[in-house]
Amino acid sequence: MNIKILILTGVIILSTSGLAKAQESASNSTTTDSINSTDSSSGVQQQLQGFNLNGYSNTGQKTWQVNGDKADISDDKIKITNVDANFYGKENANLTSKTGTIDKTSGQVHLQDDVVITSERGTKMTTDSLDWNRNKDLVTTQDPVKITDSQGVVTGKGLIAHPNLKQAAINRDVKAVIETNRDVVNAVDDAVSQKVTITCDGPMQLDQLNFHAIFTDNVVAVEESTGRRLYADKMDIWFDDKNKKIKKAICKGHAKVIQGNNASYADEMVYTGDDQKLVMTGRPKIVFDTASAKGSGMFQKLGK
């Protein structure tokens, strides 16, 4: 017995008409290990032990695969236990969850409990539930999310992203903890790494293809080692992925930097990592204490 899948110009249509028949061929896109009959009063028509569903592009290349330990099939849905899915393309990704439900009419997939996406480059996203729109190649959730990669951790609530996590947006309550390296600029600055924590009301957009992140609405960036704080309405940051540094940061709208008695204000501030300079434009104002220690990294000593 099997589920037949018809592939018409890349659109997959599920049909349960073949459930009463023996498996016709190994070339079908859905495979199962065994099938058990169930009580029709529960709404479940068949229960499959071992489940596999594949999706293909118009050119016949496999674009995704969904596996599960068990599948309960009803008239309009397929509920899968222990989902293990793979996405294929320029960068592959893996998705796991305790349960998943496929809508047989729309083809949409809802994942629930311990949802984890891991991209080929090592980025990992975790959340409680996730909706996968296969036609738009997007995953979304309104639950808290956590994205982890080699440079730091981003948390927040609500997400829309491509399954490979190359491009993602977190809706609100964003917090990013970024580990960066920096050059030693003098004898007192003996540390070569530092942690920067950035928070914002959101949304926050992440583009891993271009190593670029945009934080919006009540943005606050704090350099842990010095306590310097940078405020802005919007902050664009480009990362040097190879050297694990902040390459450039543009802060717009009510931008200010504060450390102790030092303060700097401007409509826009631009930090460049190569020369470690902070350029202020639009009514710049500087207040600084000449007795304070020299700065380094993203937030230079004010008035330098």
Image (cartoon, helix red, strand yellow):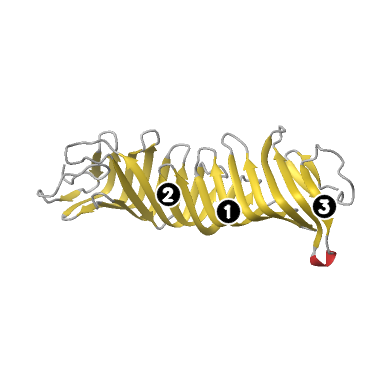
Q: Quadrant of residue 45?
A: bottom right
Q: Is residue 285 left or right of residue 161?
A: left
Sequence-wise first label, 3 or 2: 3
Labelled pair 1, 3 in contact (Cβ < 8 Å): no
Is 119 placed above or below 242 here? below
The image shows residue 67 at horizontal and vertical percentages of: 69, 46
Residue type at numbered disc 2: Val
Q: Which mark, residue 272? A: none
The residue pinned by badge 1 equals 115
Q: Which residue is mark 2?
A: 153
**Residue 213 shows in the view:** yes
Number of marks present in the image shown: 3
Q: Which mark is residue 35?
A: 3
Name of the residue lying farthest toward the right: 21
Q: Position of residue 78 (x, y in %)?
A: 74, 55
Q: Secondary structure at mark 1?
A: strand
Q: Amino acid at mark 3?
A: Ile
Q: Residue furthest left?
A: 291
**Residue at left offset 54%, top offset 51%:** 160
Q: What residue is at 47 percent from the left and 40 percent from the top? A: 208
Observer-nearest of 281 and 22 = 22
| Residue 204, percent from left and from top | 44, 51
Amino acid on which disc 1 is placed:
Val
Q: Of callouts 1 and 3, which one flags the residue occurring earlier in the amino acid sequence? A: 3
Horizontal arrangement in the rendering, residue 299 relative to residue 140 (left or right): left
